[in-house]
């Protein structure tokens, strides 16, 4: 088992190869835009419960979807052909992240990692042009959505929600089609689920994942840009 590193006020992370077997790399630090962008550029993301210190992760393997390998079932294609929903990008980021938090929080509000601190941090990234949302609308009602961080040609998915049939799947399809059109390398899904696997997600090693970050122009040197 590798040691877990304690971060201080300095802007740094230990090498991702030093993460523990289950992916935990470091504890502490803050959720400033500078630290979050450095983390994502290194293939690291924060995930912790509200009553815990900030935990930083770099799992091995990593779940990703390559836009060119998206799988859309025939039933989903038939559903999308009905054009029941309207899809938008960055139309209401605050509502998307708020609903992602509310729908996971439970009655006492403790069932989600999207604490008010996390919500504020990613909203700040959105204002800076690095965090983006995709919305699914049924008329004037927001029925599905997702948000994540974009650096270079890699999109790091954070969370999604669905209030209506197939809404999250439709959002994911539109996001991946957009990423494909823009020449993105991958969509990072962090951890595999049956839902993601059914749509073409696959697991890659940490080393291969970081190679894709470099191909997507996400090394930590030089200015970071969002090409969403």
Image: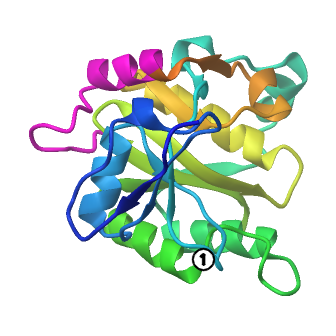
The answer to whether residue 215 is visible is yes
Indicate the position of residue 128 as horizontal and vertical percent values.
26, 64
Magenta segment: 207-228
Indicate whether 143 appears above or below 87: below
Q: Left or right of 142: which side holds 19?
A: left
When the figure is inspected, residue 69 is found, relative to residue 78, above or below; the finding is above
Residue closest to the eye, 183 or 60: 60
Seen at 33% across and 30% down, the residue is 153
Q: Name the residue located 29 percent from the left edge and 18 percent from the top edge.
A: 215
Badge 1 marks a residue whose secondary structure is loop
Q: Is 217 inside the magenta-drawn segment?
A: yes
* Lateral position of residue 35 relative to residue 207, left or right: left
Quarter of the figure with the N terminus: top right
In this view of the protein, which residue sits in the foreground, 159 or 79? 159
Q: Is 5 rendered above or below residue 223?
A: below
In the image, taking residue 152 as reference, residue 203 lies left or right, namely right
In this rendering, does residue 140 appear at all? no
Label 1: which residue?
A: 115
Q: Is 163 left, or right, of 5 in this rendering?
A: right
* Nearer to us in this view, 66 or 47: 47
Q: Position of residue 217 (x, y in %)?
A: 24, 27
């Amino acid at each position: 088992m590798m040691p877990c590193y304690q971060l201080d006020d300095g802007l740094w992370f230990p090498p991702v190869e030093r993460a523990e077997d289950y992916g935990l790399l470091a504890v502490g630090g803050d959720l400033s835009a500078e630290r979050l962008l450095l983390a994502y550029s290194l293939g690291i993301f924060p995930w912790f419960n509200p009553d815990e210190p900030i935990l930083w992760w770099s799992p091995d393997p990593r779940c990703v979807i390559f836009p060119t390998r998206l799988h859309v079932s025939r039933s989903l294609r038939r559903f999308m052909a009905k054009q029941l929903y309207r899809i938008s990008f960055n139309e209401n980021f605050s509502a998307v992240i708020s609903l992602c938090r509310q729908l996971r929080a439970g009655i006492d509000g403790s069932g989600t990692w999207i604490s008010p601190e996390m919500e504020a941090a990613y909203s700040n990234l959105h204002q800076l042009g690095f965090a983006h949302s995709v919305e699914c609308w049924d008329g004037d009602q927001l029925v599905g959505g997702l948000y994540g961080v974009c650096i270079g040609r890699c999109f790091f998915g954070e969370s999604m929600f669905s209030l209506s049939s197939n809404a999250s799947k439709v959002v994911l399809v539109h996001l991946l089609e957009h990423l494909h059109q823009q020449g993105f390398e991958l969509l990072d899904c962090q951890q595999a689920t049956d839902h993601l696997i059914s749509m073409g997600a696959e697991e890659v090693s940490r080393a291969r994942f970081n190679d894709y970050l470099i191909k997507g122009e996400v090394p930590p040197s030089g200015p970071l840009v969002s090409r969403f």
